[in-house]
Amino acid sequence: QSPIQRFVHTFGHRTCLAAISTTITTRSPMAFTARQSSSSVLATESSNKGMIILNRPKAMNAINLEMVRKIYKHLKKCEKSKSLLIIKGTGDKAFCAGGDVRALVEAGPTDESKSFFREEYITNALIGNYKIPYIAIIDGITMGGGVGLSVHGKYRVSTDRTLFAMPETAIGLFPDVGGSYFLPRLQGKLGLYLGLTGYRLRGGDVFYSGIASHYVESTKIPELETALLNCPDADDVPELLQKFHSTPEKPFSLEPVLEQINKNFTADSVEGILENLQNDGSEWAKKTLETLSKVSPTSMKVTFRQLELGSQLSLAQCLIMEYRLAVRHLERSDFQEGVRALLIDKDQKPKWQPAQLGEVSEEHVQWFFRKLPDTEELKL
């Protein structure tokens, strides 16, 4: 399977997940009050602990504007009244497979589409500065918007079932939800590699890369949740997580090519990276070139600039920049065509405009980063 075929399998065939159970079972002996299970977000709480459960298993817990608003509201409430907060997804397939991009593209650059990005990024910023311990249990598929709901939190628990990716360049978008902040801060050039290629990290890789803070076997997650919900003091959370943490069985899958990633992705431009990979000539370099040949040339150049700028900015500044990029992508970009080709028509043959990297002008790249009118800028 090509990277695009794998992407379509994850994002395009949501109906095949209908068999996932939608029932929530609280495995804690504590008395929790959960809202009706038909709700897309279950906000549950005990006397002094909060929990958010993403509850759209048929859509792999992909988030929409309604869900973002519910999550934000509960986060604000718990920050003032609880000692810790856990966020997780329903079922064993996904934590959250991202934002509902198909709905965004079909709506176009409407106020509601802009509101989705604006309120999602405001939620990402809140998580990045959360005042009580925030524990994201990223068990299963964690992509795009799901990364934004986890990676900025203090504690990110991956499992043997975790599948992480930022595959936005394959649909003519850019690695958002604070990607410009966390990707350049990974070791060496790993973040730039992940952002441009959409490479998938599985299981222990998510911990070794630094995306996750802990690794816990999926069979032990119910026990971990119970321990956290019964934790008498929030100060005990680090020790408790360390107790459940284990060394992944398999070594870091990218370890053999980390040196090549650092060498080849150290360049002044995307063209420089491609030239390095061509000169490298290894099997890994050829596969990487093949992946990059399929993604949007404009997205590659925008992503390269975004991560370059983001390496020097705060999370809030990154999200303000990304909101400008998101609005521009709704207005005029490869985003619509990428979603059409991969998620709507599923012909897997996007017609990128422009089609060649050399045709993406510096002026066009700069246009994406231009300041919005004062009234439209993201306020954090």
Image (tube, helix red, strand yellow):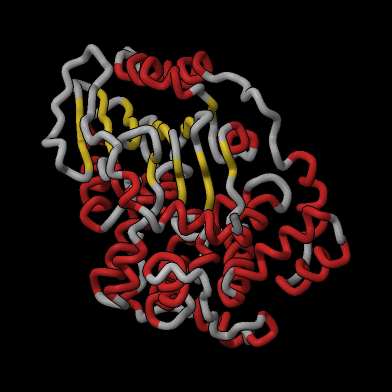
Q: Is residue 227 left or right of residue 23?
A: right
Q: How many marks?
A: 0
Q: Is residue 325 visible?
A: no
Can you give x and y, in whole percent of width and height, for residue 363 in the image? 59, 87
Q: Is residue 341 left or right of residue 197?
A: left
Can you give x and y, in whole percent of width and height, for residue 104 in the image? 32, 68
For this orientation, the residue located farthest to the left is 36
Q: Quadrant of the C terminus?
A: bottom left
Q: Is residue 32 left or right of residue 88?
A: left
Can you give x and y, in whole percent of width and height, for residue 83 in the image? 30, 25
Where residue 20 sits, quadrant-wise, is top left
Can you give x and y, in whole percent of width and height, for residue 125 in the image? 39, 51
| Residue occupying the point 26% across, 24% down | 49
Where residue 303 sits, quadrant-wise, is bottom right
| Residue occupying the point 43% across, 45% down | 128
Where residue 379 sits, quadrant-wise, is bottom left
Q: Quadrant of the N terminus?
A: bottom right
Q: Is residue 127 left or right of residue 359?
A: left
Q: Nearer the viewer, residue 249 or 326?
A: 249
Q: Is residue 185 visible?
A: yes
| Residue occupying the point 36% across, 56% down | 99
Residue 255, placed above or below residue 336:
above
| Residue occupying the point 50% across, 29% down | 159
